Image (cartoon, rainbow, N blue to C red):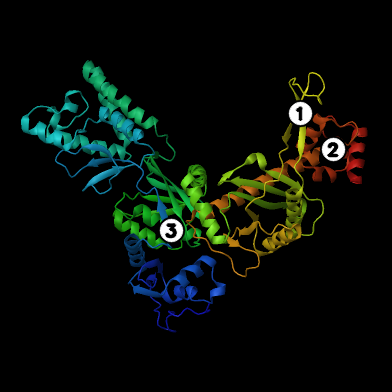
Amino acid sequence: MADVLPYKPAQGEIPTDPGVYRFRDSEGRVLYVGKAKNLRQRLSNYFAPLHTLHERTRRMVTTASSVEWTVVPTDVDSLQLEYMWIKEFDPPFNVRYKDDKSYPFMAVTLGDEAPRVLVTRNRKIPRARYFGPYPKVWAVHDTIDLMVKAFPIRTCSDASYKRAMATGRPCFPGQIGKCGGPCSMTVTIEEHRAMVDDFVAFMAGSDERFKKDLTTRMLAASAAMDYEAAAKYRDKLASIEAVLGKSSLVLPADEDADLFGIAEDELAATVQQFVIRGGRVRGVRATTIEKELDISDSELVDQVLQRAYGEGVDVPRRIIVPWLPDDASELEEWLRERRGKKVEIAVAHRGQRTDLMRNATLNAQQALIRYKTRRTSDYVARTQALTDLQEALGLDTAPLRIECFDISHLSGTNVVASMVVFEDGLPRKDQYRSFNISETTDDTDSMYQVLMRRLAYLDRPEEVEIVADAPLDDPFAEEGEVVTTRKKPRFSYPPQLLLVDGGKPQVEAAARALRDAGHTEIGLCGIAKRLEEVWLPGEDFPVILPRTSESLYLLQRLRDEAHRFAITHQRKRRKRDISTVLEEVPGLGANRIKTLLKHFGSVTALRGADLAQIQEVQGIGPALAANIHRHLASR
């Protein structure tokens, strides 16, 4: 592969102005769209020597056959043009959004003669005001049912409205008290419009004004002995309280903001958006983003905000994000043009905003786990993953059984290893194993030792255990006893693929173990965490699986599961070792061990304490303190 791309622009050809650039393939398809404050400086990063590029960036620029750019007057214009081109061309190397249309909204059709409220996923109703999104359809219906009791506005269909207005007979929802529009023949169009304005104002966050107003009217009607009107005001107030009870006050009552919690790994990110109006969470939305190229936290936030507010969505006064994007000022200007007022992009540093950000991030992390789990547990996805792995790794058959190995240690000590097993793309937790490694020089030596121990089981003869059972006529069995045999569970079933956590050094150590054990028929690869590269033995360059591929998700989950299992085993071993050291002290029981560890925090701190400090612990006398000090000093 040549180290210089043939379509690299000539020196000085690229301008230094702000603008937007596009990489295209040989058929003219747009592969990637990006913006830059300085086009020459930004594009020079893509045309650096290929061996210095990120693996996935190298894949993009070598797939492309041309690059073009458009100069714009300001950075805000480049942000706008980038968004338009991404929407138009849907480039495969830009971030990809999932479940973008899956959340329902409450919409009020302000462009109609008599606006109605409805549940919809259509974001293109002319002059409609949207509220939400809501996580479930029933949540929108519940909110509407409560709201129309306090603000009885139209809920019937357009056809029902036209028929009622033409005939002078109330629409059917109006006859049963479910519609309060002019079609119910109880209010005029002007009175209904005023009610709609109140409905929209309340949903936009002005809840305290309506509570105070209704309370004042209820008390006034009661004082005037108009108990029927007072009861109506009371019922409306109860409906408003019910709506507010579904959304707790999380920020000051005058706060209008959108808060974004983000969780990500090398392949994907999930975004949890809290829509806060009047200090209350009015809507929640989770979006999953697939990342083809490696992007920074700042770039990720930039893309999230562009997507969130690029289609006429209401822009709040404040937007709270986990990381401030590099072009925050340009984004604020872009959002100000959409809102018509000042917009602030801020990071939560303390107080209620920090607590809410922590909650949103936790929800995003759980959503990311669910997304990855769904992908690896779906039958079609699993089948596709195994087929893709067979082709990418050059295996003779699909790897129906994959074993993944990971090494874990604490600053070079307490070295352990884990083995996790996936069959047909699903975990077989009953066949997970852990290994203790007493002496080793480094991770590659540890990997070699563990694989030699595991591969040795493949060559052992079949083991059988004898089991006594119910009486049976058997001349060789004692009276009243039956002798049966069954295979003992062990590692005799060979995997089609061994996966190791690590890059080229770990893979070469594993390949040496396969050769020495005489099992070169088993497939082998390694996955390096930082770049998600897949390494094969004897190869100088890694295999780059597409970031959106099911095969890479399967390998990633195997690696993460092996790491989790190794860490769990190491912690259990450390805890057991700590207890064992202290249990060897004469006169020191379980309760006193617990008290000592609670007081000092660790065995290391206890070992560094003198006799006087040990005697300060409740229940530890001079003689026992001397035994503890002497025992730990000798270890």
Q: Which residue is mark 3?
A: 95
* Tag in front: 1 or 3: 1
The residue at 46%/47% (across/down) is 380
Horizontal and vertical percent position of residue 589? 84, 30
Regarding residue 212, the answer to whether it shows in the image is no
Q: Which residue is mark 1?
A: 467
Q: Residue furthest bottom?
A: 11
The residue at 19%/29% (across/down) is 180
Query: Secondary structure under badge 1?
Result: strand
Spatial separation of the CA atoms under disc 2 and disc 1: 41 Å
Q: Which of these two is toward me, 515 or 74?
A: 515
Spatial separation of the CA atoms under disc 1 and disc 3: 59 Å
* Tag in front: 3 or 2: 3
Residue type, numbered disc 3:
Val
Residue type, numbered disc 2:
Leu
The residue at 58%/52% (across/down) is 399
Nearer the N terminus, badge 1 or badge 3? Answer: 3
Query: Secondary structure under badge 3?
Result: loop
| Left or right of residue 476, residue 59 in this image | left
| Left or right of residue 31, residue 464 in this image | right
